[in-house]
Image: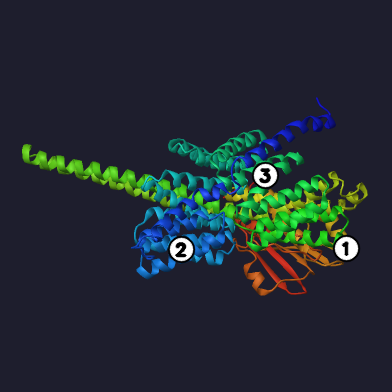
Amino acid sequence: MLSEKNFIDSAKKPFIGLVICASMLFMSFPVNAQSFSQHDSLSYKLQRLESTNRFNPKDTTHINLLTRLAFSYRYLDTDSLYSIAERALKYSKDIDYTHGKIRALDALGNYYYNKGNRDKSMPMFEKALELATEIDDLDSEISIINALAQNYSFEGNYAEALNLNLKGIDLAKKIDNQEMLSILNENIAGLYADQKDFKNALMFYDTVQKINRRMGDEVIDAETQSNMASLYKDAKDFKNAMFNINRSINTFEKNKIYDWLAYAYEVKGDIYLDQGKYKWALYWYDQSNMLFKHQIEDDRIKIQLMNGMAKVYFGLEKDSLSLNYAKKGLTLSKKIKSIQGQIDCSETLYKVYKKNGDDAEALAYLETFKSLSDSLFKDKNKQSLSLLETKLQYEQEKQELIESNKAALAKQRNYIYFSVIILLILSIITFVIRRSENIQKKLNKELKEKSLAVTQREAQLHEINKTNTKLFSIIGHDLRGPIGGLQGILKMFTDGEITTKELVSFIPKLKTDVENISFTLNNLLSWGMNQLNGVVTKPKRVSLSNLVVNNIQLLSEIANSKSLKIINQLPDNPRIWADNHQIDIVVRNLLSNAIKFTPENGLITIDAEEKSGMWQISIRDTGIGMTAEMQRTIFKDSSNVTTYGTNNEKGTGLGLSLCKEMVHKNKGEIWVESVPRKGTTFFFTVPKALNRYQKAS
């Protein structure tokens, strides 16, 4: 096995050889050959048309050439794209040429989209889609739906993007547009890839590759391979990533597709960067940057390139160059309103400034990174995607039922025709009608039963989706934070950014975070099992005193840290008839809440009173109290608001909902009485244990 030094030395020769080969490649054809490949041909046709004696600028042939020329400048010269599209739109409006207006609006929408101005691009696309729908121009409608989906995907609205892509797929199937089927399925794969759901992403890419093989277009197949390479890179499967990106680069170089080639070079640089091979990464980033400098205008890819080069220079300890590229990427991200770009570039700038000891600048970029990351994380699109998947499953089941009903009705009609023939020939109409009626009743009964089953299934799916949404929200919002903090501190320690002494100073906070995570997980697992599996309540004779004493001991350390006094005023060994585990959860959550919202040196009192065969338990605190509005909403199932205690303790908002469910399962009630700034008392009731042989009802 080579040492690190020998490995670097052995890599020098192929590295230099590749540079020479690449230089020869770019010398073998003009730098802007691709820019003249399509739009120069269109420009020549346009000049010939305009030079004829009978030329009319408002002729539909002229307008069509203008719109095609405008699109050819999309990634090469956006100003030309805009000016040509504006001309085409004006001429189309003058003669009320709907198809021309659609194409011109589509081109203008792409111009504003590439500039990051979605406030202007979206109305353009929506108007174009409206016109395409009016004249039943399915090809244009699919193309614009694809553009709209890309807009929504770029701004992070994955749910709407998925809806549009699915709609486009349905339309593409109607007219057998294989190219758009490939693109739209690849868009969906990209949505899953953005969510790091590699399994579903690869499933859609498998569909895309099957379509590509049917078309036999190597350029389209190479575009898919470059996107798959990026996916494999994110999944840390560098072998497959390199295999796909090398194949795509060969195709793009052979066909001189420079906008995609710039992207492919950038992805190959990313692959080397993720492996810590900075010199190789820099080489491929330079190739991509060369194309951007001479002929490509695609700010979205350029942001990734700038940040990638910043990371490379940081790894090579060339901090001034790293700062320069990271700042360029951040400026470009702000220009086109790319949240992810701002997050990535801010993180890089934070690391560079921190390394150089500029704490003020490092802190500023860290706060920007943290703020934007938190904002992006709160997005509910992952849950939305899950809901849409369920919706698709339901729609599929519904469609299957409709088809089944159609087949049954067709079968019924055949019986009716047969009965008429038998009536005319054999005069046994009575037998046939009765038989037909019986069949019809049976079919109607089956149809009714199936419809009822579908309705019940729909209700179940709705409840499951509602539960899933709440579970993901709690996990994402309240567990990811402390776990991420723990992970961040450990990473800083392993990277040598903090000393062992500094790590030890974080131990009290880490201990508190772990205790919060443990408490939250206990509640979450109990609630999740209750919602998804249906927990069975098993009442028995339970010592209330034991439950209370155990929970006081469990939470005593937290109470002592705030100098809180907990007074147990329970009567002598009260016995309740309830599920021991469930009431234990209730006591622990209510006592934890009292500790959380009671300031230092406060008092918490636990009492119980016998009333009409029930024990009424109260947990009273001298805490901050709550408003009347909070008291009305605190037990609602839909309430999932994180609250903070007097020492900034964090909770999930799940505990009280769980308490309510557990108390009700044990045939009790729960309520709250509170006065702001004076304190809160939670009451709940459970049945009294009558004798040692009492049975569950």
Which residue occupies the extreme right position in the image?
501
Q: Marks 1 and 3, Cα distance to the nearest angstrom?
A: 65 Å
User: Which one is nearer the viewer's eye here, 335 or 587?
Assistant: 335
Estimate the spatial distance between the alpha carbons at disc 2 and disc 1, rounded to whole Å. 68 Å
> Which is more toward the observer, 566 or 643?
643
Q: Residue at x 51, y 37 (%)?
A: 206
Q: Residue at x 24, y 45 (%)?
A: 440
Residue 105 circle label: 2
| Disc 2 secondary structure class | helix
Residue ID at (15%, 44%): 433
Tag of residue 563: 1
Q: Nearer the viewer, mark 2 or mark 1?
A: 2
Nearest to viewer (mark 1 / mark 3): 3
Question: Label 3's element?
Answer: helix
- Could you give the CA–CA distance between mark 3 and mark 2, rounded to whole angstroms? 34 Å
Pair 3/2: label in front: 3
* Amino acid type assigned to the residue bearing label 2 in the image: Leu
Q: State whether residue 674 appears in this view.
A: yes
Q: Position of residue 505 (x, y in %)?
A: 90, 53
Q: Earlier in the sequence, mark 1 or mark 3?
A: 3
- Residue designated by label 3: 287
Mark 3 near mark 2, Cβ–Cβ under 8 Å? no
Q: Secondary structure at mark 1?
A: loop
Q: Quadrant of residue 264?
A: top right
In this image, 686 relative to 165: left or right? Answer: right
Vertical position of residue 270 compared to residue 119: above or below: above
Q: Position of residue 129 (x, y in %)?
A: 43, 61
* Image marks 2 and 1: residues in contact by CB distance under 8 Å: no
